[in-house]
Image (cartoon, grey):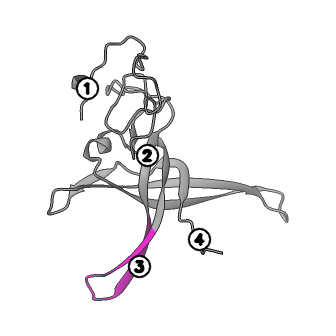
Amino acid sequence: MASRSVNKVILIGNLGRDAETKFTPSGAAVTRFAIATTRSWKDQQTNEWKEETNWTNVVLWRQENLANYLSKGKQVYVEGRLQTRSYDDKDGKKVYTTEVIAEEVILLGGRAEGATSGFESGAPVGARSAVPGGSMVAGRGKGAGAGAPPDEDQFGGMGVTDDDVPF
């Protein structure tokens, strides 16, 4: 029997801070953000509800314009893989960190009050496009339109073209 392993993470949580994008020396965009996931349970001894929040660091490659939409408090769906790496801190001590390398990021929920981006969340959209009234998706090209017939208007007659996309 062949040996098999799986490294897959799916998280739905809220952003703890605005996403930050930096660029590698070769020009590749690296967007980093942290999301909070919370679990609740009833304590068997006290019969009280308790909560525990876990913070997870997420790294998203080659999606520089998505950081504009990943702001503190927004709910996101993240799918990816775990990766542990090490580095030496300023005192020369080896530090290990584990983070999720995102393959897909989908904004969830409605547009925040006062938001002027023109984008609301709800239905997924491909990695290279954004649709007013739809959500933003970063990833491997999955999303609405990936399997839609070419003659079907995916944008409900809004006349949206590639030239209208901000990235």
Residue at the spot x=55%, y=61% of the render? 54
Residue at the spot x=74%, y=56% of the render? 41
Q: CA distance from mark 1 to mark 4?
A: 41 Å
143 magenta-colored: no
- Identify the disc placed on residue 105: 2
Question: What amino acid type should be assigned to the residue bearing mark 3?
Answer: Tyr
In the rendered view, tell whether residue 141 sits above or below residue 28. Answer: above
Measured as percent of width and height from the top left, residue 129 is found at 33, 32
Location of the C terminus (image quadrant): top left
| Viewer can see residue 42 | yes
Query: Which mark is first along the chain, 4 or 1?
Result: 4
Question: What amino acid type should be assigned to the residue bearing mark 4?
Answer: Arg
> Mark 2 Cα within 10 Å, few/some/many (few <14, many 20+)?
many
- Identify the disc placed on residue 162: 1
Identify the magenta region. Answer: 83-99
- Identify the disc placed on residue 147: none
Residue annotated with mark 4: 4
Q: Nearer the viewer, mark 1 or mark 4?
A: 4
Q: CA distance from mark 1 to mark 2?
A: 21 Å
117 displayed left or right of 80:
left
- Disc 1 on helix, strand or loop? helix
Measured as percent of width and height from the top left, residue 91 is found at 27, 87
